[in-house]
Image (cartoon, helix red, strand yellow):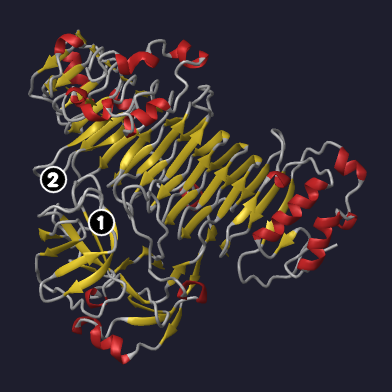
Amino acid sequence: MSLGPLWSAAALLAAVLVGSPLFGFTAAVRGGEASAPLVLRVAPTGDRAPRRDNRFADLPRALAYVAALRRQGEGRAIVVELEPGTHRISAPVRIGPDHAGTEGAPLILRGAADGSSRLIGSVPLAPASLPPRQRARLPVSARGAVRAYQLPEALRGELAYRAPRRLRETHPRVTEIFDAGGALRPAQWPNPGPNPGPNPGRNSGWTTVAAAEAGGLAFTFKDGPGLPDLSLERDLWVEGFWRWDWLLETLHVAQVDQRRRRLELDLPPYEGIRDGARMRLVHALGALDEPGEWWRDAESGLLLAWPSPGAADLEVSLAETLIRVDGARHLRIERLRLERTRGDLIVVRGGEDIEIRASELAWAAGRAAVFDGVTGGGVSGSTVHDIGASAVRLVGGDRATLRRGGLFVRDTRFTRFSRLSQTQSSAIELDGVGAEASGNLITDAIGYAIYLRGNDHVFRGNEVARLIHGLSDTGAIYAGRDFTARGSVIEDNYVHDIRTGPGMEVKGVYLDDMASGFTIRRNLFVDVQQPVFIGGGNDNTITRNVFVASSPMAALDARGLTWMKPSLNEADSEFRAAFAAMPLDSAPWRMRYPKLAEALTDEPGVARNNQIVDNVSIGSDDLALTDKAEAGRQIILFNTHLDGPAPNPGDLDALARFTAERGITLRLDPLKMRRDRLPASPFAEARR
C-alpha cells in the first residue's frame, strides 16, 4: 500500500500501537537476511508531488514507521533519506531504542549527496505594519529602511529575547533572526565597526564602565557618538567583561537613568564590576541604526529589523533542538545540513555507536552536537561553523573506574564557534574518559580550540589558529582546576597565530590552576604568545616540541604556594571537591596513579616533577619561572635554543631548511602538520 504524505496519522498510530501487519511484511523478510537496506524517503516541507510507496511528508512520520518495522522484526539496515530541499521542524525529532539498528545493519539518517537536504528549526516571518510610535523611536537614518514582521505565536509569550549568560550558563537559549546570509544581531551600541570578525580591535564595538557602585549591580558608563535614548527600553541588555578579560557575561537591565548614564542590573556579574571594564548595550530600539540589526517588542509580538541589502525575507529560530537521541544504538547521521535552533542542534544521551559524518552543522544558538553518556561514536568529516557556544561536547566513559568511552571528533573543520557565548566556550569539549580529537582544523573564533576535562583524552594532529583574540589570561588548548584530571595527551598539533591585543596575554596550551599529568609532545608552535603554560601543576611532560617566534617556550608558576593556597587547604573549595569526587583509593586509580590519594598531604602547592626535555626553540626565550616556582624541582634537559634570523613564521619549508642547516633533527615534520586543506564543506566536491 502507499504510505505517502497523506497517509493518516491515525492509521500510523494504530499500526504502531498494535503492531498490525499493515506494512505487508512476509516472514521471510522479517526473519531472513537481506543484503540491500530498506530506503524510506522524506519529502521536503511544502512538497506536493504525487504520493509514492515508502515516502513520507515529514521526518517524524518516517521514524514512527521505522519503529513499527523494528517491532515487527525488520533486521535490515534502514535508510531514512531526506530528499533535496528544506525540511522544517518546530520540535525535536526523537530517536530511541525502538529505532535501533545493529552493528551490521544500522539506522541511517541521510541527505542528498550534494548537501541540498537541509533540516532547519526556523520559520519565515510574515511582514507587518510598522507602528508610528515605534518608527518615531528609531534613529532618523533607519526610519525608511527598518521593516516590521510578526513573530510566531510560540515566541510572543517570551518575556525576554534571550536567557542571561553568566559564568555557569554555558549555552543559554537565544532567539535568533536569519536572512539568507546568516544571523542578524540584536541592535547594539556602540556598533562593532567594519571588521566585526573573530579578531577585531580591542575597543571595536565597546564603551567602558565609568564608575562601578558597591554591590556589583549598578554602574555608570562613558558617553559616545550616537548614544540612544534608553528611557523607554523595556528589554534592554548589556554584555561586558565586567571583572576579567576572560569572561564575557550578558545580563538584563533592571533600571535606566538616562541623564546620569546609570544602569542597574537584575543580577550581579561574577565577582562584580570594575571601573574601565569593556561593555556595550544590547537589544535597544534606539540603537537599530544599520543593516543586519533587529529589535523585538514583547508586548505586540512585532520584530523590527533593518535587513541586509537584498535580503528582505527573514526567518526566526523556533525549534529548541533538531534531533534528540536517547538510548539509541547503531545510528548514522550523514550528508545533512543542520541549522538554526534556539539551543543545540543534536543532543545524544546514552546508547552506543552513534556517528554524525559528512555533514554541515551551523547557526545554532547553543551547541552543534552533544554526546553525553554515549559509548562509541562522535563526529567525523564534517564542517561546523557559526555556533553560538561550544561546538561539540563529548562526555563518555566512567571516571570512577577509568573506563574509556571511545568518543571522537575527526577530520572536521571548525570556524566561527562561540559567537554568542564568546568566553568559556570551545570548538571541542572532551569530558569523562578516553575521547579523541584528531585531524581537525580549528580556526577564526574567539573561543578555545579544546577544553579538556576528565582523563586519558587525546588531542592529536590538529591545526589550531587565530583564536581567543581580544581576551586575556586564557588559552587555545585549555584544562584546569581538577588535580585528578590526568593522563591526557596533546601531540602532533600545529598551533599558530595565537596572540591578543596590547596589554593582554594568552597561551597556546594553558594547564590552568594545578592541572597535572598531561603530556605535550611533538607539537609545532609558531607565533604563539605563550605556547605552554603550567599554572602550578606537576607531573606534566613537555617534550620534542618546536617553538618558533613563540616566547617563552614554557612558563611555570607555583601558584599553590601563593594566591591559590587557600583553595588547596579549605575543605569546601572547588579544588578540594573535585579531588574528593574521585575514588582515589580504588584499584583502578591506585594502579594508574599510585600516589595521587596522598597528594594533598605531601606539599600539594609545590610545582614539581614537570619534565621539559628535548625541545627546540627558535627565536624564543626558553623558560620562565614565576610565583615561587623552582627549576630544581623540575626535570629540564637537552633543550636546544637557536637564535635568528628565524625563518618567516608562516613558511614551513623554510623552517625545515633552517633547522637542517644547523644540524638539528626535528622530531616532527612541519609540512605534514597542516590541516587547512580540509574542505570548507563536506559537499564541496559534489557541487563542482
Q: Mark 2 sits on what residue? A: 501
- Name above or below for residue 513 compared with residue 181: above
498 on left or right of 184: left
Q: Amino acid at mark 2?
A: Gly
Q: In the depicted view, which residue is nearer to us: 393 or 192?
A: 393
Q: Earlier in the sequence, mark 1 or mark 2?
A: 1
Indicate the secondary structure of the residue bearing disc 1.
Answer: loop
Question: Where residue 175 sits: x, y (%)?
Answer: 41, 65
Question: Where residue 362 sits: x, y (%)?
Answer: 44, 54
| Residue at 73 percent of width and 61 percent of height | 55
Mark drawn on residue 268: 1
Q: In the depicted view, which residue is nearer to us: 33 or 126?
A: 126
652 on left or right of 406: left
Indicate the secondary structure of the residue bearing disc 2.
Answer: loop
Residue 136 picture quarter: bottom left
Quadrant of image for the N terminus: bottom right
Question: Where residue 541 sits: x, y (%)?
Answer: 29, 16
Q: Are marks 1 and 2 in contact (CB under 8 Å)?
A: no
584 on left or right of 138: right
Q: Amino acid at mark 1?
A: Pro
- Name above or below for residue 346 compared with residue 620: below
